[in-house]
Amino acid sequence: MNLYINQLNKKADFKERVYAGDIFLDTALQAPAELCAFARQSITAAFDGETDHKALHTKMPVTEFIRLVTRLKGQFTNCLDVKEMIRRFALEIGIDPNEYLFDVPRLRVVPNYEYLHAGVSYAYKPHRDTWYGSSQAQINTWMPVYTIEPGQTMMINAGYFAEPVKNSSVDWSLNEWINVQRPLAGSNVTEEVRVHPLPLEEISTASELRIAGNAGEMLTFSGAHLHGTVANHTNETRFSVDFRLLHIADLLSGRGAVNVDSGVKDSEAGYKDLFHLNDFSSFQGVNQ
C-alpha cells in the first residue's frame, strides 16, 4: 500500500490505485482551497456572524449548537456553488465529469467529545463506507477546514484494507437508515441511539494512520478502507469537508475494491444521493 503526495492530478490511472488501497494526499490543489474558504464563509453565516469557529462549542448550550449545525449542514449540502467546486476539482485532477457521479457534499462538525459526540456530530466508530451500502468503486475525499492535530483528525486503519472484519452490516439496512435513522440526528444529544453497522471484533490500532493536515489539504482514498473519527478531546471544534466520486461504468459493472466483508443487501437505496458530475442531474441507477 502506498501514499502518493501531490500526484492525484499526475496519475491518469489514480482510480485503479485507489481501488488497490493506495492513498493520495494533495496539498496544493486550487479547487479544494476554494471549497475550504467557502466552508468558512458558510460557518460564519450559519452561526449568525460568529467568526471564532473553533471555539463555537464554548459559546452556547449544546442544544443551540445542534440547531445551528443542522442549519449549516443543510445549507452546505444543498448549495449549488459547492457542487460547482466539486466539478472544478474533477477537472483540476484530469477526470471527465461526464464519466463520474458524486454524492451530496458534507460539512462535518466535531467539537470536544464530552460536549457532543452523537447525532449531528457523531464520532464514527471504525467502519468501511461499504458497510453503509456504498459501492466498492467509491472514491472518498476528505479535507480539514482548519489545520488540525492528530487528536482531531480522521483515522485510516490501512492494515485492514484486505483483511475481513466481523461486522453487523449483514443485518443493517440502508433504506431504513435513509428514511428513519438519518433524520433523527438532531435528537441524539447525550448518546448515539441510531443503529450503525459496527465491528463485532476488537480492532488493532497497529496500522492506524492519522494525517494531521492543513486547511484545504485533500485526502483521497477508497471507501472500502477501514476508517473512523478520532475522538476529539481538544478544546477546538474540528470542521472538515468530504464528498465521494464514483466512475459510472465501474459502478454499473461492479468494478472497484475487493469486497472482503460487507453484507449490505439494499445498497441501491443510496442511488438517490448520487448526481451526475457534468450537469448535477439525479442518478437513476441501472435503468437510466
Image (cartoon, rainbow, N blue to C red):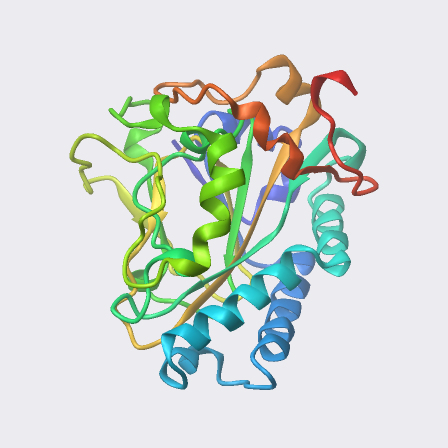
Up-down: is 127 above or below 37? Answer: above
Q: Quadrant of the C terminus?
A: top right
Residue at the spot x=63%, y=47% of the render?
Answer: 104
With respect to residue 31, does 223 lie above or below? Answer: above
Q: Is residue 110 left or right of residue 166?
A: right
The image shows residue 278 at horizontal and vertical percentages of: 81, 39
Question: In which quadrant will I find the N terminus?
Answer: top left
The answer, for residue 48, to whether it is visible in the render is yes
The extreme top residue here reads 253
Q: Position of residue 272 (x, y in %)?
A: 66, 35
**Does residue 95 appear to the left or right of 162 in the view shown?**
right
What residue lies at 52% left-to-right and 72% top-to-bottom?
A: 68
Instruction: Work out which residue is located at the far right of the displayed protein and give it.
Output: 279
Q: Provide residue 285's location: percent of width, then percent of height.
A: 70, 23
| Residue in front for this viewpoint, 250 or 126 | 126
Tell me how many marks there are: 0
Residue 32: x and y in percent read 63, 58
Residue 280 as seen in the image, left or right of residue 186: right
